[in-house]
Each structure stands twice: as structure tokens, then as C-alpha cells.
Image: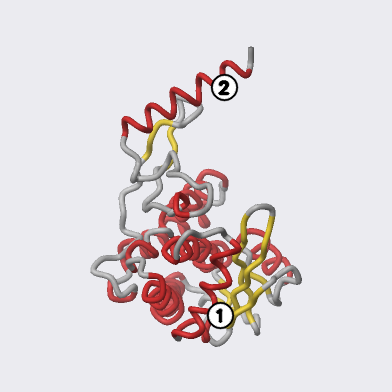
């Protein structure tokens, strides 16, 4: 095992070679693709995240699951070497934190699968890694969560692109290694445009979406990403519709900006 790679992946994406000590509940991914297993997960996670209904649990799970998917994307692009992740090898952990609940991941056996040395071999390997992860691991988990919660499958998948778009943009802006930048863009393009919709069990690839930007809440000179789908924060205790939520009307967004800036200006006086 490459300890530096494992530490890097763990610190960025909450994926570890052993269960985190602070986990309150742990589940095997294989158990979560059956009715009893996913029901137990929802019943444990809901109170910890203060969900008002099961749909909020499903949306939040989709958001946290994007970290695992990003671990695959990042490993493929940066290292051309990826941890083998499948339902029998994956564990999912609920970790209460200050006012919220983290979802982390671990592998029963951490094995890295390297890409071939030649570029065409790497492309074929990448396509296989993405297809197998989304078809055999991600899709069964999210489909079962959809059935248990009543939240449409597309809404759960829709939580992933927002974090992906932000992270890919950050990677591209923060690294000057030309080969790495080419891999980042090419690999993400394949995920968005190359993977068939049937891999996700949807009518269309959920990553193939337009990135929409809106005026920043604090700074009129900056643009921020609008979320791809609602995260259902408003369906948690004390929650509300987020500023970047696609549910929010533009008039409401403008009102929030004005109110925030007035409050910010008055606090500086």
C-alpha cells in the first residue's frame, strides 16, 4: 500500500483503510441493498441529522456519497491508481459531529488497481473503473435508498454534480502539472459524456448537466455555483431553503442578497 496516497484520499474524501474510531453506527454496503438494511440505516441516520422525513435522509446521503465517488475520480486522474471499491468491500459509517452527522467510508481490504502504463491502455482502464463503480456499487445503493425513502432516484443522483463541478474546477485552477490537468478534464468529460445513462439506471447521465452560476451572496463581483438539485436542508429541524438552491426564485435570491449586505455593512459600523 502507498501510505501517502491512502492518507491523501482519507483526508480529502473520508475514505479509510479501517473503520473510523469515532463512528457511532457502521454498515456494510452489501447489507444496504436490501430492504431491512437500508431501513436500519435510515432509522439511525435520520435522528442524527435531525431529518423531518426520509426524503431528507436520502438527499443528504447522496451528498455524502459524492465524496466516495470523488475519491474514485481523484485517484484515477491524479494517481492513475484506484482503490478497489465494491459492495462486499465497502463499509459506511455515521459519525456525529458538532450539530451534524458525517458519513464516512472504509474498505475491508485496501487494494490499489493501477492503470496500464500506455495512454490508450489507461483510457480503457479508466472507462472500466468508472463503469464498474457506478453500475455495480453506486447504482444499487442509491436505487435502494430511493425505494426506502420515496425520494426520486434522479434527485439523489442529482446531489453529486454540484460537488463534482466545484472540485474539478478547483483542481484545474490549483495545479500546473499539464499531464494531470489533461487527465482531470478528459476523465471528467468521459464521466459526463461517455458513460451511458443505463449505468445509473436513469433516462440520462446525471453528471451531464449545465453548470449554472449566480451572484455571490456577499460580493457582487463574484459568481458562485448554483446547486444542481435541492439538498432538502429545509426538511431538517431549523433548516431553510439555501441561497444557492434551484428552488429559490430569483426575486427571493435578490432579497436575500440585499438583506445580507445591509446586515454586513451595519455590523462594520
The residue singled out by tag 2 in the image is: 264
The mark total stands at 2
Task: Inspect this view and state whether residue 127 appears.
Answer: no
Looking at the image, residue 91 sits to the left or right of residue 118; the answer is right
Residue 155: % across, % down:
35, 61
- Residue 183 is labelled as none
Q: Nearer the viewer, mark 1 or mark 2?
A: 2
Position in image of residue 103 (x %, y %): 59, 65
Q: Which residue is at a point 57% across and 45% down the rendered structure image?
A: 174
Q: Is residue 250 left or right of residue 188?
A: left
Q: Secondary structure at mark 1?
A: loop
Looking at the rendered structure, which numbered label has been put on residue 84?
1
> Which residue appears at 38% of the width and 35% of the height?
214
Residue 21 vertical position relative to residue 87 in the rendered view, above or below: above
Say what secondary structure mark 2 lies in: helix
Residue situated in front as seen by the camera: 61 or 162: 61
Q: In this view of the protein, which residue sits in the foreground, 254 or 185?
A: 254
- The answer to whether residue 230 is left or right of residue 9 is left
Q: Residue at x 53, y 52 (%)?
A: 237
- Quadrant hosting residue 91: bottom right
Amino acid at each position: 500500500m502507498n501510505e501517502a496516497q491512502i492518507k491523501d484520499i482519507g483526508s480529502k474524501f473520508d475514505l479509510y483503510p479501517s473503520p473510523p474510531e469515532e463512528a457511532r453506527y457502521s454498515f456494510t454496503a452489501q447489507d444496504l441493498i436490501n430492504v431491512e438494511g437500508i431501513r436500519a440505516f435510515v432509522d439511525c441516520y435520520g435522528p442524527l441529522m435531525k431529518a423531518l422525513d426520509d426524503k431528507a435522509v436520502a438527499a443528504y446521503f447522496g451528498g455524502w456519497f459524492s465524496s466516495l465517488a470523488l475519491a474514485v475520480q481523484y485517484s484515477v486522474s491524479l494517481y492513475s491508481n484506484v482503490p478497489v471499491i465494491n459492495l462486499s468491500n465497502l463499509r459506511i459509517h455515521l459519525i456525529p459531529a458538532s450539530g451534524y452527522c458525517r458519513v464516512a467510508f472504509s474498505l475491508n481490504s485496501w487494494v490499489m488497481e493501477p492503470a496500464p502504463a500506455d495512454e490508450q491502455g489507461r483510457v480503457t482502464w479508466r472507462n472500466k473503473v468508472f463503469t464498474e463503480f457506478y453500475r455495480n456499487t453506486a447504482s444499487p445503493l442509491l436505487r435502494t435508498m430511493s425505494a426506502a425513502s420515496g425520494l426520486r432516484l434522479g434527485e439523489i443522483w442529482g446531489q453529486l454534480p454540484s460537488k463534482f463541478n466545484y472540485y474539478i474546477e478547483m483542481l484545474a485552477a490549483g495545479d500546473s502539472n499539464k499531464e494531470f490537468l489533461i487527465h482531470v478534464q478528459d476523465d471528467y468529460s468521459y464521466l459526463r459524456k461517455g458513460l451511458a445513462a443505463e449505468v445509473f439506471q436513469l433516462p440520462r447521465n446525471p453528471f451531464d448537466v449545465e453548470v449554472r452560476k449566480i451572484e455571490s451572496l456577499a460580493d457582487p463581483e463574484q459568481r458562485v455555483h448554483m446547486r444542481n438539485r435541492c439538498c432538502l436542508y429545509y426538511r431538517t429541524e431549523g433548516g431553510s431553503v439555501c441561497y444557492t438552491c434551484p428552488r429559490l426564485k430569483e426575486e427571493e435570491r435578490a432579497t436575500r442578497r440585499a438583506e445580507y449586505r445591509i446586515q454586513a455593512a451595519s455590523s462594520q459600523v
